[in-house]
Image: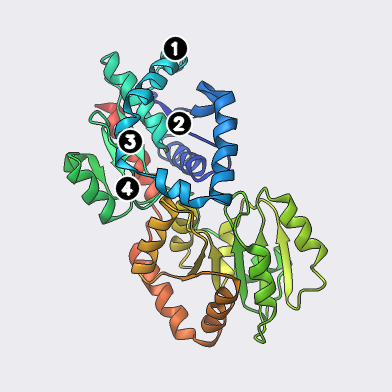
Amino acid sequence: MRFRILLMYISPRSGHHAAALAIDKALHQIDPTITTSLVNSFRYTNPILERIISETYLKVIQTTPEVWDFLYDNPTLVKNTQTFRKLIHRFNSKKLSKLIEGFKPDAVICTQAFPCGMVADYKKRYNLDIPIIAVLTDYCPHSYWFYDNVDAYIVSSFIAVDRFKKNGTPADRIHEFGIPIEPNLTRVPSPETVRVRWGLDSRLPIVLLMGGSQGLGPIRNVVQELAQLQEQFQIVVICGSNGTLRRWLERHQKKIKKKLVVLGFVKEINELMSVSLVLITKPGGLTSAEAVVMHLPMILINPIPGQEAQNARILLNKRIAMQAVDGRETALLVQKLLRDPQLVSDMREATRQMARPHSAIETAALALRLARR
């Protein structure tokens, strides 16, 4: 039997999308005959609303993050918007019906709460027997994930397991596989090959700096503060879609007292992670999971209130990461790591206890088992 698996996410170039791509690749590794379809569910159902919400979200987290902190996982808000969310799901049901009836999936995998809720309500309304696998791409769940007819939840921390159990989810539906990452993430060329490929000095430690797919955070300030350190090292900055940041760094490249490599989107981020001393980043779920699997210590800066703040707490508790409040403190923590190889070794060892390199394969295998039932 050739299985058909529908994968639903929101936002291209996001952790939700990256997780869906990782699971899709794992599905085809397990069963090359499988048919899959990846759908940006927000764009598919509400293309105009998608753009408005995306732009509003970015503006809020950049200018008034305290507003997002209030909105995120607010139980009163979740309860008060339940009727409205059901109306949205019903409004989207015609398009969803076209997708489900046209593709005829044997299972649906959702890497974000919006499509998960939409498919869960659709399944209940029409009494369908399609397994739904909900995949969390952060370390802690929020209340928009909880549905009684989701067949499996893929989570990445004991905190998430405990919260689902307290919400009434049966234990056999909760699977602590980890955040699904690229199945072949750890397969990288030799350090020498990587350094040559990216134009890096073979003699100097590497500090890797990124701010998610949008290149958010005080990256300019961090680079300026790093440049003031007396220690010898080189800096790699991943700017993502932030063209303004990239152009500024390129203009000031010669003024920086360290070797500085400026990049946009990088598909092979695992290569750079494999040769770096430390990653300075916002604690997005996918980025954090990838760094953990690559045994890379982290310095966390400017976590977005809500999901990233919760991710940060877990990473700090596991002693995999340290947190800085600004560029100066970030530079001082980098200096500490450069001067203390034992601290770096201890942080790398801590990642080994948390790393889940086979998360995508385990998720794909579970999806196929549920599709066969």
- Few, some or many residues within 10 Å of mark 3 (<14, 14–19, 20+): some
What residue do we see at 34% from left, 68% from top?
A: 318
Which secondary structure, mark 2?
strand
Q: Which of these two is toward me, 347 or 198?
A: 347
Nearer-N-terminus badge (1/3): 3
Q: Amino acid at mark 3?
A: Val
User: Which residue is disc 1 drawn over?
Assistant: 94
**Distance between the Cα atoms at labels 3 and 4?**
21 Å
- Label drawn at residue 8: 2
Q: Is residue 305 left or right of residue 55?
A: left
- The amino acid sitting under disc 2 is Met
Percent x, y for residue 20? 47, 39
* Distance between the alpha carbons at the discs numbered 4 and 1: 30 Å
- Residue to which mark 3 is pinned: 78
Above or below for 367 versus 162: above
Residue at numbered disc 4? 155
Question: Which type of secondary structure does the marked residue at label 1 adopt?
Answer: helix
Task: Classify residue 147 by image quadrant.
Answer: top left
- In whole angstroms, how far apart are the C-alphas of marks 4 and 2? 17 Å
Q: Is residue 40 visible?
A: no
Residue 36, position as x, y percentages in the image? 47, 28
Q: Give the crowd class for mark 2: few <14, some 14-19, many >=20 residues within 10 Å.
A: many
Chain-order first, disc 3 or disc 4: 3
Q: Residue 130 occupies which quadrant of the picture?
A: top left
Q: CA distance from mark 2 to mark 3?
A: 22 Å
Helix, strand or loop at mark 4: loop
Coordinates of residue 15 in the picture (x, y in percent):
50, 46
